[in-house]
Amino acid sequence: MAFKCFPLDGFNRDPVLNPAEKAAIIPWQESHHFPYKDKESLNGPLLRLAAPVLAALKHADYLDEVKQRRVISLIFLAMGRTQTTYWSWTSAEWNSLIDSASLASTHLEHPPHRSKSRPLLTCACLLHGPEILLNSRRITHFQDLAGTILGRDGIQESVRSMQEEGVRLGISANTKGYMPAYLSEALLLCGSPRLSDLTIDVFVTLKDKYRTGSKLMRRTHQPVTRILHNLKVLPYPLIREFTKCEFLGGVNDDLHPEWLSWINRWFETSTMDLKTRQAHRNHLAKLGRWFAATYPGSTSPEQWTRDTAAAFVAAVSSMHIGDWSHPQSRVKREPRKPLKPRSKCMLLAVARCFFFDCQYWEWLPYKFDPSNLETPRSISCLVGPAPRVIADLHWAKLLNAGVGMTKKDVPTFLIRAKAGDQSNAATYYPFEMVKALAIIWLFSGLRANEIQRLRVGCARKQSPVEDGFYPQQDKKKPVCMLDVPISKKANAQSKPVDPLLGAAISAWERIRPATAQQCDAKTGDMVDFLFVWRGKQVSVTYINRTIIPLLCQLAGTPTSDARGAISSHRARATIASQLYNAPGGFDIRDLQHWLGHRTPQATMSYVSPSVTKLSKAYTDADFFARNVRMIDVLVDPEGIHSGAATAGQPWLLYDVGHGFCSNVVYDKCAHRMACARCDFYLPKESSYVQMLEAKQNIIHMRQALALQPEEIAAMDGDEEYLNKLIAKLEHTPTPQGPTPAQLRASDSKT
């Protein structure tokens, strides 16, 4: 490809040397010196080959006679050795000539220095095209080369526009020296000094060139393409590409090719999320290793039967950490440490999913039911909600550290490495962005990827009176609503949060540079992400790797406790538990909506009732009083000492409300809550009771009675239960023998 600024159409580009040119080039082939004396010596047969070289040097302003002589001599010496014209040379042959010009050569009177090969490189680019740069591994001064070929004013204007936009976006200064060179090389490849002529294919080509070699040049394509994307030059920026996710340990050479093909086929067909499919693929690799080791010669899922499924369930039940992993896996084998119950459940669930899909898609014949791979009860009962709540004391310290964070607390790095010079110290992310991330983690209860995907304008204030969130007397209490995008299992929602969160987000939005919209991978929409710096979305691991260790350091708390390392998800469980346990806090349904769960069962996995709330609930339930009733008892000591009690006279009376019961085993009477008024019953209006109460030595005491559930309900005034209790005792004999029905019948006769 020729440059538009230097057309080659006017030159004779015949790649073959004619007889006259071959004869004229013999002195160049045999000479160890420069046969070139002056321009007139090139007239004649060699003019066709010398004119383009001189025109290229003139276009690049290389008018010095010595430089022209050196370039022509090097080119003609190479043509003499190869017996071909430079029009037929490949990029590799041109680069070989340029590299040799940088070293000592016996063919030259004065071997050129490395920097003196620049005119030859310029001439090669103009005569052969910019493709010559793609085969060169040497980092050259591309900005100077581009200015020489395409015009210095145009290149400088393009570089200045890119640098200004980079400063606005916050592009790190440590790559500024490479960014102009990278952009200049891209402009050389497209053959124009204008940014508007750049295409995404040019940067894809450069990305392939620097896939190996210079590390800084390999990383420069990301900030450069992000800047050009914000300038609306490129349709999208080039991001760092990762290799396709391999199995755990990075290798899969121990799997049989047929089993591996089944796994890859399922991986490409399943509609699950990418990360879920990647995790399932690792488990299926373990499944294949177990199958090959247990049943030698078996290589396909088609060979699975019900007996195979039963054997695999038994093997998983006794599996240890590291079993059936690749020998070079990063997972350490611990023969004495069994696999956790949750991991066993996951392994069996993946196996069920795989065989169910393969049978449903009619890839496999129906030889057994995938439900035969059901998790045994002995394992599933060990898996339950276990919220890893951070201790209240440590959480309070983390909250204070986040709210009180200052700019001095954020780690900095030196832009220019000078001993003792802190004038150029800067943070990787702006302080306002770091604090906003910390406050959101501490107050929002969001997942890490939900925080990463928050959008500009997600925090908004609402009037308490207008929206009805607070009654009239609380109108001074501020309200902040946080708009949460579509999450793992819930649609987009708005949730109330502390106003500190809204203030932190507003402070960041005031200094956040305007950037081009980026694609939300979950929804496919082009949106303005909130946390974008240098034109790049913040990493989903930034909270775990930077924010949490920073807060722990400021708070003076450890980064791990008895429940494990403090991670982003543990804040979600802590906030959920505190909202649930607070006086007048959320009920489980409100908390479910606030957390963005689909079912209350999922919310219960995050809630840990506090001891204080359980104690209060137990006290309010009045467990002992509901199961034990204190009844008033009248005891007649005189009747006991006089012997009247032995003669059958009442001496112990139980107060049943409307009368007294003289049965000494009243606590065992079935009719005590619905008195049948047998012969032991004494109305309070009777003369005996009035006389007994008038005695001065009568003893008043209280006795506890254990109650049945029906009696408790009847005691609480439940008419339905009282009627059921009466009906139940209708034909139950009283302590004297007759049933309540018989007693009523005898009363009616009298």
Image (spheres, grey):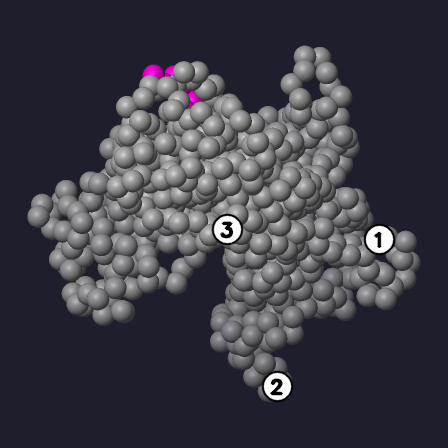
Highlighted magenta segment, given as a residue range: 101-106
Tag 1: amino acid: Pro
- Would you call the spot at circle 2 few (<14 residues within 10 Å), some (14-19), or many (20 or more)? few
Q: Which residue is mark 1?
A: 478
In terms of secondary structure, what is the magenta stretch mainly?
Answer: loop
Which of 729/562 is in front? 562
Figure quadrant of residue 709: bottom right
At x 65%, y 31%, the residue is: 173
Would residue 466 appear left or right of 158 to someone viewing this image? Answer: right
Above or below — where is 355 with respect to 325? below
Mark 1: which secondary structure?
loop
At x 68%, y 68%, the residue is: 717
Tag 2: amino acid: Ser
Q: Can you see residue 335?
A: yes
The image's mark for residue 158 is: none
Q: Can you see residue 449?
A: no
Q: Which residue is mark 3?
A: 7
Above or below — where is 579 with respect to 269? above
Would residue 674 appear left or right of 299 to someone viewing this image? Answer: right
Q: Which residue is mark 2?
A: 748
Where residue 418 appears, x then y in whole percent?
Answer: 67, 15
At x 59%, y 35%, the residue is: 61
Above or below — where is 748 with respect to 93? below
Quarter of the rendering occupied by the C terminus: bottom right
Tag 3: amino acid: Pro
